[in-house]
Image: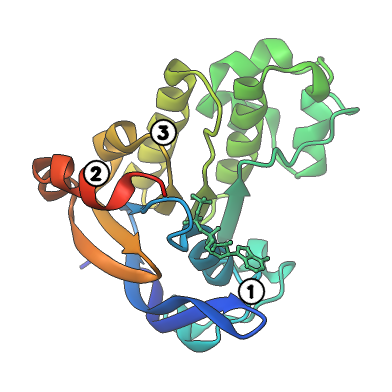
Amino acid sequence: MPETLLEARGLRAGYAGVDIVKGIDLHVNEGEVVALLGANGAGKTTTMLTLAGELSPLGGEVLFQGHSKAGALHKRARNGLSFVTEERSIFSNLTTRQNLSVGRVDPDDAIAIFPELQALLGRRAGLLSGGEQQMLTLSRALSRAPKLLLADELSLGLAPKTVGRLLRAVRAAADRGVGALLIEQHVHRVLDIADRVYLLHHGRIQFEGTAAETRASLDDIQAAYLSSG
Ligand code: ATP
């Protein structure tokens, strides 16, 4: 039986006491990639921030490996939780190698995930392309051997080929046992690597299913729930 890494029970979340996320149940097991889908404003980022401990729940609870999760950010790494976002959390003035070193990551581990980083070790991270920067970010996150990866639009604005590269690296990590929860605008691409899907609509889980089930209903889901506005 795979272990449940992350679980939300009746989770309510939002800002200044206003519920955006209105009581959701979800879980992520070790070794699986779970996609969190939904239109703009559905509450995906709010959910993710709360799961990551950056926002306190307004109700319900978040359990990490069966324990109620303390919010403090600095505990994340120790807890085996890694959170990456579209914002590139790199130091532009440091080289790729220095960025890895600041993150206490062995360059060989990062290169094992993205071989293209080898040639970029001496380059200032600010000069890397957007895709290369996200490879650096993701390699750093995955090299720390997290149990759980939370990723909010890791591939925002990147070329399709790069999106595929990043998502395949997440899949490979999951195949080694990491659990991953992803918010991705590239629905088809994320379904290619995801095991399961939760669809969020106005702060509630409207649908949950396997990636195959989601793909089978995708036209209806997209028309009803994924168009913006
Ligand atoms: P998107 O795909 O557009 O990022 P999302 O599904 O991630 O959408 P959220 O970012 O969770 O949605 O936003 C849900 C709602 O919460 C939106 O109506 C948004 O305006 C509101 N919201 C987000 N951040 C804050 C904030 N800091 N204070 C108040 N309201 C906020």
Extreme-top residue of the structure:
119
Of circles 3 and 1, the one toward us is 1
* Label 2 residue SS: helix
Q: Who comes first in sequence, dot 2 or dot 3?
A: 3
Which residue is pictured at 26% across the width and 54% down the height? 197
Q: Residue sitting at 25 percent across and 34 percent down?
A: 192
- Label 2 neighbour load within 10 Å: few <14, some 14-19, many 20+: some
The answer to which of 225 and 172 lies nearer the viewer is 225
Residue position for label 1: 55
Nearer to us: label 1 or label 2: 2
Q: On the picture, is 203 further left or further right than 134?
A: left
Instruction: Check disc 3 and report its element: helix, strand or loop.
Output: helix
* Visual colour scheme: rainbow
Residue matched to label 3 = 167
Residue at the extreme front = 229
Residue 72: x and y in percent read 71, 75
Q: Position of residue 198 (x, y in %)?
A: 29, 59
Amino acid at the residue labelled 3: Leu
State the CA–CA distance, disc 1 to disc 2: 29 Å
Tell me the quarter of the image containing the N terminus: bottom left
* Residue 222, numbered circle: 2
